[in-house]
Image (cartoon, rainbow, N blue to C red):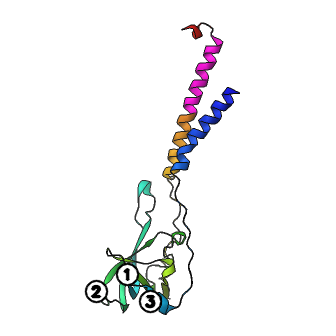
Amino acid sequence: MRRLLLLLATLVLGAAPALVVASPAHACSCALATPEEYAAQADVVLEGRVVEDDRGRGFLGRPLDERRFTVETLAVVKDPAGDLEPGERVEVRTATDGAACGLELLGIGGTYRIYATDTGEGLSAGLCGGTTELTAPDPGEGRGDGPVAMEPWPSPGLVLGGLGLTIGLAAGGAVWVRRRRRSADPAAGQR
């Protein structure tokens, strides 16, 4: 019975790091609005063509939480600060996927009406902001990649959880072997 409890305790403690470092879940739910309402909520409204899509890479090659689009401005619909001009290229930041309210529909070569917020560090747009497609992306480019595909590397939480489980099992196994040897060798218990 003690062996079973020791084994269960080892498994629970070994799996604990995986629970502690698990990635947060995201959900995005949007309320519908009219183009006028989207424009009223946005700091900047522009029509532009996507010329670059940069997801960036983080730990172990995993995608970062932010995706950046470079957009060539075709028309400025709303810009109270007067910073944007047609022909200018701007960077628009968004979350990496729709579950985190990121723009998924943008594809290189497509033109869009983008409703953005000025964060002080640049423009940011999200799934619920009203961004709409005006013309489809180039046929060879598609509509971005959609949600981020899992990279061939395992997630850091999985790696740490597996490592913790392996160490816990190894320690539990060593204790079990040592106790088994002591019970088999009466002289060992007298030392």
Q: Quadrant of residue 3?
A: top right
Which residue does the image show at 40% across and 65% down from the upper left?
A: 56
| Residue topped by disc 1 | 71
Q: Is residue 96 above or below residue 155?
A: below
Nearer the observer, 189 or 144:
189
Q: Is residue 35 above or below residue 156?
A: below
| Residue topped by disc 3 | 39
In the image, the segment drawn in magenta is 169-185
Q: Position of residue 6 (x, y in %)?
A: 63, 30
Tag nearer the camera, 2 or 3: 3
Q: For residue 181: magenta?
A: yes
Q: N-terminal of the two: label 2 or label 1? A: 1
Q: Amino acid at mark 3?
A: Ala
Q: Position of residue 147 (x, y in %)?
A: 53, 69
The circle on residue 83 is 2
Residue 135 shows up from this direction: no
Cα distance, mark 2 to mark 3? 17 Å
Q: N-terminal of the two: label 2 or label 3? A: 3
Q: Position of residue 110 (x, y in %)?
A: 45, 84
SS class, disc 1: strand
| Left or right placement of residue 7 versus residue 38 in this view | right
Q: Amino acid at mark 1?
A: Val
Q: Quadrant of residue 4?
A: top right
